Image: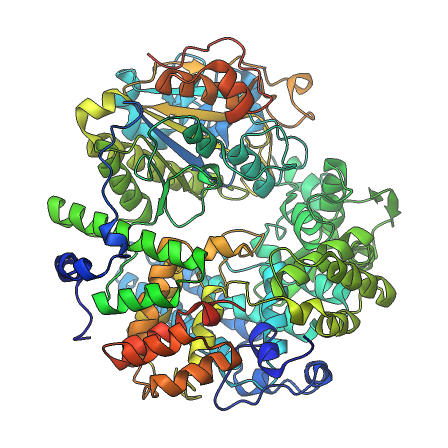
């Protein structure tokens, strides 16, 4: 079996839609990646630079509130602080809606899938406080612009983005012999120094992989090399030489330059790591597992690996191989759609309007989307750890996972007041050539339209891709 | 919403519908086979790498306070003295009565065979596999334990909560469930869902389990009077206790929040608060009689660095601590050979040196609780383990 438009939309896209046409050829899917990014323009989110005023205001609000403790000014100061936080939470819900709409309305669905794949590969999010609202900015600043470019550029953008520096504790990491550390020691300050979290995850998760050829010494050296990467709420990302460990570092047997041109050294080591054969192998396997199946054809992995090597980390040639390899089309529907993909592909099949989330009350959004996604095992843009969401199908198809999907599919489509389509026709819209007789029977035999729609959406042919 | 039944009505009706639905999972005969043994084992996995040195503080070793520049150390800073050398973290204060009653103990400086790379994910996988290395690991040690016992049914052992418990995965029967999932649908919809998923064993099995477990939960809610939601860890503890009062002999689940790279003082206080509340919920949930034969074993994938890092936290380390609770454990003691904290005593000159294998302690507990033979433990449950001398963790 070769290329099929419907399978392309299900496996490499966001699911079948009665409105958006399926791609006719693999080349069209590739061309869509280099064309204009309509969805980012139509459903925008704040960039980190646009988000910065919120962080500045939050800092000022906290200061004002602390100063007002015990005075008559406290209630007002507290209200100001809380209102800004609440405003961020509402904005974040809006951006979740934008993220969902991009998947529902797109005609270049492969791009949306790649953005989410790489976002998960380079997981970072705002952990607590105001910065929680800036996770969508990380995706649009660091990942989205690079999905059709080179891996090393995406890696550099990710490793230097304030959200990543915050997420993996790089922001305050000081070189043991850096001027800032020495000043701190001289002043008797404690609780400052090196943090190796980001360095470790770059090696273990982002590049070489846990079985890759690195040691604890490499982690330590990379952690020292990365010192200086930080950000502040005034201007965002900063490279501060005074935090940086002086001298050279040796990583994977190669010596990296004397500091002073610190950010160039960071770029040099990240480029080398991005272009390492172990990284290519790691990424090839992940792509094959994510897009094709949990136990991918070794020949597909080899072909992706070869494309990485030939293109020295350029991503388009890799996608070209992925979309043209026979295993990409011969493998039966198998991978479990993660909950976000399940919910958004359901809305796409239901032809949800592009204004669905505008003016939606916060409570309704939380009830219909946020909480159900958590119950299905996936919190939006908040994987359980820096290693992202699991790929293993069994992780999603647990009793509570399946029960939560059924509960959502049978209740939410009607709750959000979509005019539910005729279930018998909906079978073909949602499943295309993958419709089976039991699903047709169930769609016709269900007691009510919402249950019939829910049964189509929870059928194996819709939950797998 | 009118055609969506409440769960209780669904259950009341399903008994009637069931007569014509031969394949209904609700009709699966309840097994009254007597459980294979009578003690109760709860395994709690703390995901993220608990700082055992902060939880069981060796404040009697001067090198410890020297290595912790901002983190509070010892009874003078809020910890609870245990034996004049170790003190437990102040956030464990709710468990102090258990310590005094001999129902709480610790093992210090223990670890799995995992070394060097300090990856959470590999560290947890190895702890859950119970093997020497991850090569070829495909099932979990709790599952292999069940496989060696006669009379084990799906009701004997429960893996609970939303995070997958790999230690329970394998061929031996067991149940997997996250309490409070909510599973309301008409009996007709359930039958049709069974039909639609018939040819997909993975989905069909999950659906059948969901139906069985939500029935179970509904019955318990009815018996208890629904107490309402109080946080995932307590919902899990309550559900586990309910099962352990009955046929269940093993429950396992995880609690997150231990990866304290920054602001450890705050994060650790919160995480230990959750752990304390979980253990107390288990104690009150199973009742005094069952508590007397219960051992709660708390493990983590690794400890953390001796020295505090630059962000008021600690980084991934090696040797860690275990916690033991329950009437069946010989508590009131800190077990484990103390390796010392001088630079030469440390692992890689940075981490607490492990002096015992977590699996050895688990092995002796399994032996005492289930009567399993030492050779079965050393070859099947924890292949390649040398159990060594009995540390005497059980009464």
**Where is residue A421, by image quadrant?**
bottom left
Q: Is residue A355 above or below residue B55?
A: below
Instruction: From the viewer's perspective, tell me whether residue A216 is left or right of residue B227.
Output: right
What's the image's color scheme?
rainbow
Residue at 28 percent across and 16 percent down: it is B100
Percent position of residue B87, x then y: 41, 20
Instruction: From the viewer's perspective, tell me whether residue B207 is left or right of residue B5.
Output: right
Residue at 33 percent across and 78 percent down: it is A443
Q: Nearer the viewer, residue B212 or B231?
A: B212
Quadrant in which the N terminus of chain B is drawn: bottom left
Q: Is residue A205 above or below residue A32?
A: above
Percent position of residue B278, x then y: 30, 37
Q: Nearer the viewer, residue B395 or A136?
A: B395
Quadrant in which the C terminus of chain B is drawn: top left
Q: Is residue A366 visible?
A: no
Percent position of residue B211, x then y: 28, 55
Percent position of residue B72, x then y: 46, 30
Q: Is residue A368 above or below residue B71?
A: below
Q: Nearer the viewer, residue A148 or B359?
A: B359
Q: Is residue A288 visible?
A: yes
How many marks on residues? Answer: 0
């Amino acid at each position: 079996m070769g290329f099929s438009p419907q399978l392309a939309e299900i496996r490499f896209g966001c699911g079948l839609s009665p409105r958006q046409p399926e791609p006719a050829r693999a080349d069209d899917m590739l061309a869509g990646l280099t064309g204009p990014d309509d969805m980012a323009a139509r459903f925008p989110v704040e960039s980190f630079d646009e988000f910065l005023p919120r962080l500045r205001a939050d800092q000022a609000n906290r200061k004002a509130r602390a100063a007002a403790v015990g005075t008559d000014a406290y209630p007002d100061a507290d209200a100001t602080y809380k209102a800004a936080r609440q405003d961020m939470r509402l904005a974040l819900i809006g951006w979740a809606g934008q993220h969902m709409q991009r998947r529902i309305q797109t005609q270049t669905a492969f791009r949306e899938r790649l953005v989410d794949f790489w976002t998960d590969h380079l997981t970072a999010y705002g952990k607590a406080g105001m910065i929680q609202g800036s996770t969508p900015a990380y995706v649009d600043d660091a990942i989205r612009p690079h999905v059709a470019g080179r891996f090393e550029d995406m890696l550099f953008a990710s490793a230097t983005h304030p959200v990543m520096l915050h997420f993996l504790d790089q922001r305050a990491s000081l070189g043991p012999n850096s001027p800032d550390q020495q000043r701190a020691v001289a002043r008797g300050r404690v609780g400052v120094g090196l943090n190796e979290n980001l360095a470790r995850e770059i090696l273990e998760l982002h590049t070489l992989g846990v079985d890759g050829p690195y040691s604890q010494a490499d982690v330590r050296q990379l952690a020292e090399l990365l010192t200086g990467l930080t950000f502040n709420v005034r201007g965002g990302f900063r490279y501060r030489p005074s935090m940086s460990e002086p001298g050279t570092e040796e990583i994977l047997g190669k010596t990296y330059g004397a500091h002073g041109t610190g950010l160039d050294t960071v770029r040099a080591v990240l480029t080398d790591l991005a272009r390492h054969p172990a990284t290519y192998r790691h990424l090839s396997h992940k792509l094959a597992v994510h897009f094709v199946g949990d136990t991918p054809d070794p020949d597909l992995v080899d072909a992706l690996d070869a494309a990485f090597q030939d293109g020295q980390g350029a991503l388009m040639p890799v996608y070209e191989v992925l979309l043209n390899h026979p295993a990409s089309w011969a493998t039966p529907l198998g991978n479990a759609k993660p909950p976000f993909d399940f919910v958004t592909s359901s809305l796409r099949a239901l032809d949800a309007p592009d204004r669905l989330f505008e003016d939606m009350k916060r409570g309704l959004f939380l009830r219909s989307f946020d909480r159900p996604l958590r119950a299905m095992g996936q919190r939006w843009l908040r994987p359980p750890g820096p290693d992202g969401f699991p790929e293993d199908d069994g992780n999603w198809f647990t009793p509570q996972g399946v029960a939560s999907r059924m509960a959502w599919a049978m209740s939410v489509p009607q709750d959000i007041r979509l005019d539910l389509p005729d279930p018998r026709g909906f079978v073909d819209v949602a499943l295309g050539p993958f419709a089976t007789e039991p699903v047709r029977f169930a769609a016709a035999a269900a007691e009510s339209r919402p249950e019939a729609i829910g049964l189509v959406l929870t059928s194996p042919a819709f939950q797998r891709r | 919403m009118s055609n969506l039944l409440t769960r209780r009505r669904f259950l009341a009706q399903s008994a009637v519908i069931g007569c014509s639905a031969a394949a209904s999972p609700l009709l699966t005969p309840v097994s009254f086979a007597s459980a294979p043994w009578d003690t109760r084992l709860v395994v709690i996995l703390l995901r993220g790498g608990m700082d055992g040195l902060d939880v069981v503080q060796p404040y009697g070793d001067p090198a410890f306070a020297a290595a912790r520049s901002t983190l509070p150390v010892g009874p003078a800073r809020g910890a609870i003295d245990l034996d004049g050398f170790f003190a437990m973290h102040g956030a464990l204060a709710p468990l102090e009565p258990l310590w005094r009653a001999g129902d709480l103990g610790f093992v210090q400086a223990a670890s799995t065979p995992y070394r060097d790379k300090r990856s959470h994910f590999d560290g947890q996988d190895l702890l859950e596999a119970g093997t020497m290395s991850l090569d070829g690991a495909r099932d979990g040690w709790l599952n292999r334990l069940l496989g060696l016992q006669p009379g084990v049914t799906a009701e004997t052992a429960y893996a609970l909560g939303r995070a997958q418990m790999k230690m329970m995965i394998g061929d031996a029967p067991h149940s997997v469930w996250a309490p409070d999932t909510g599973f309301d649908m008409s009996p007709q919809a359930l039958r049709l869902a069974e039909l639609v998923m018939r040819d997909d064993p993975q989905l069909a099995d999950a659906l059948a389990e969901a139906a069985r477990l939500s029935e179970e939960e509904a019955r318990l809610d009815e018996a208890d009077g629904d107490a309402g939601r109080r946080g995932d860890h307590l919902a899990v503890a309550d559900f586990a206790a309910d099962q352990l009062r009955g046929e269940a002999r093993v429950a396992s689940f995880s609690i997150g929040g231990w990866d304290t790279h920054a602001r450890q003082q705050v994060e650790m206080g919160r995480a230990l608060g959750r752990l304390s509340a979980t253990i107390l919920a288990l104690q009150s949930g199973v009742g005094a009689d069952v508590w007397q034969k219960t051992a709660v074993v708390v493990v983590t994938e690794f400890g953390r660095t001796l020295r505090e890092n630059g962000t008021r936290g600690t980084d991934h380390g090696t040797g860690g601590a275990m916690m033991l609770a329950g009437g069946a454990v010989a508590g009131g003691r800190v077990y484990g050979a103390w390796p010392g904290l001088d630079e030469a005593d440390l692992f890689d000159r940075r981490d607490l040196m492990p002096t015992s294998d977590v699996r050895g302690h688990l092995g002796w507990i399994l032996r005492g609780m289930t009567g399993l033979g030492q050779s079965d433990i050393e070859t099947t449950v924890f292949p390649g383990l040398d159990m060594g001398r009995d540390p005497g963790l059980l009464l």
